[in-house]
Amino acid sequence: ILYSLLFISGAVSYGQADCDVLSAYVFPDTLTLCRRDTIRFDSLQDYTYLWSDFSTRTYYAMDREETVGVTITSKTSACFTQQSIVLFFAPKPILQTPMNIDTALCLDDTLLLDASAQTNVLSYYWNIPTDPLNHPTDSSITVICDTTKQASSVYYYVVSMLGICTKRSLTVADYTIYDTAKVFFQLPPKVEFDKDSTYCFDESLEIEALKPDFDATHYDIVWDDNSRKNILQIDTSNAGLHYVTVSSKHCGDTATDTVTINFWNPAWTQSHLIKDTGTCEKIEIILDASVPFVHTTYLWTHDSSTNPVVNVSQAKSYTVILTDSAGCQKEFTANVKQEDCAPKLTMSNVFTPNGDGRNDLLSPVTSEKLVKFSCRIFSRFGNDVFRYEGDPSEMRWDGKNRGADVPTGTYFWTVKYDDLFGKTYHQQGTVSVFR
């Protein structure tokens, strides 16, 4: 037997003690370990090692099931031992019977969530969605539907089941299994409308049967108009009393409520108000937004005027805000466009001064009042046959020149005049005389 030999080298003696240790050490035939666990012989620290994979570390890391051999040799003597150990993986937890829970609970219902039917599980760790700081470690928990739950919401209860190796960081993922229960809590519906109200005529509003903390998809909702959405749109077309009935689809609980919504009649429905119009430069026009209600106030945004009527001369948009006695407001806008305001003067191009009472006189027609008006009519040879200065509305040419009839033919005319703002204009044309 090797460990019983005594070796002497120089002045150093190697004793029998090393061999005695090896002979007394009990080596296991098999080991059940977790992945990446290590084999280490703590009582044999002053020895060298040669493992079957030819490594010489003092430990062996397990990464597969196998039979591993090791030769352990004393550092101070020739004593050694050869051993073989059969390595097995520790059993993993197995999810044999999932809870398979997807259910709904009504108020005061209870539900047992039991995860104990699995194998190779050493401990449990629950995640409670309604109580995130609480993590029960029992194999089962009881869930209660009460008013602390969020109305009509789905909760996921997750249990982590840990096997023998889950306390070792390298194997925790391999030795943990999970199971989930899906639980829907349906609390009785609550319908609580605000108080009856009156709104401005142009407003519209939405009223909800169920508040946002209820999932409306799990309730049957019926309004007075037989609509079935959670939100009802209300305006002047459906003002008045409204009511709704809400029933839970799973539990049969019912809630109802009523509300009356009205709208003020606006002050401006009877007003002509302001319309789009045009203006000439320097000529003021009137914008009238008045309504026949004395308590209505006005605010023009272009100059902060509070009069119902304003005079404007610039081409742009003008907005007035009306506020009635109920505090309702409405904006009205008139677009004032720039127009061509040059005076228009026309004269007939034919007249027949034959004394029959029809078309016997030639006179200008004007669209505006003109000042400094003058007119000259002359023949094709440039000879004057008529001159006039004064009010254009009083000009009359009877087809005579110094009391005698001018010959039939074509004559030329020119006019010159000023508008009311002092701007001078020139026009010219022809007129044919027939008798």
Image (cartoon, rainbow, N blue to C red):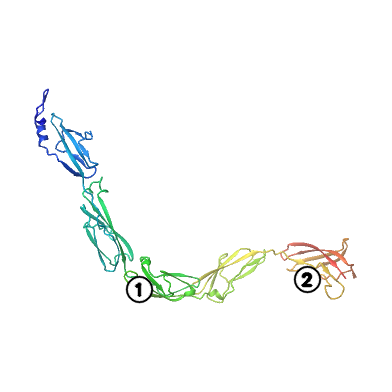
Give the residue drawn at x 27%, y 54%: 178
Task: Locate residue 237, reporting x and y percent.
Answer: 49, 74
Image disc number at residue 393: 2
User: In terms of secondary structure, where does tag 1 sit?
Assistant: strand
Does residue 325 appear left or right of residue 370 in this picture?
A: left
- The extreme top residue here reads 10
Give the residue drawn at x 76%, y 62%: 425
The quadrant in which residue 77 appears is: top left
* Crowd around label 1: few <14 · some 14–19 · many ≥20 (10 Å): some
Instruction: Report the front residue among 122 and 107.
Output: 122
Image disc number at residue 255: 1
Answer above or below: position of 428 versus 20: below
* Crowd around label 2: few <14 · some 14–19 · many ≥20 (10 Å): few
Q: Earlier in the sequence, mark 2 or mark 1?
A: 1
Amino acid identity at mark 2: Ser
The quadrant in which residue 312 appears is: bottom right
Amino acid identity at mark 1: Ala
Marks 2 and 1 in Cβ contact (< 8 Å): no
Task: Locate residue 12, reporting x and y percent.
Answer: 11, 25
- The extreme right residue here reads 404
Quarter holding the C terminus?
bottom right
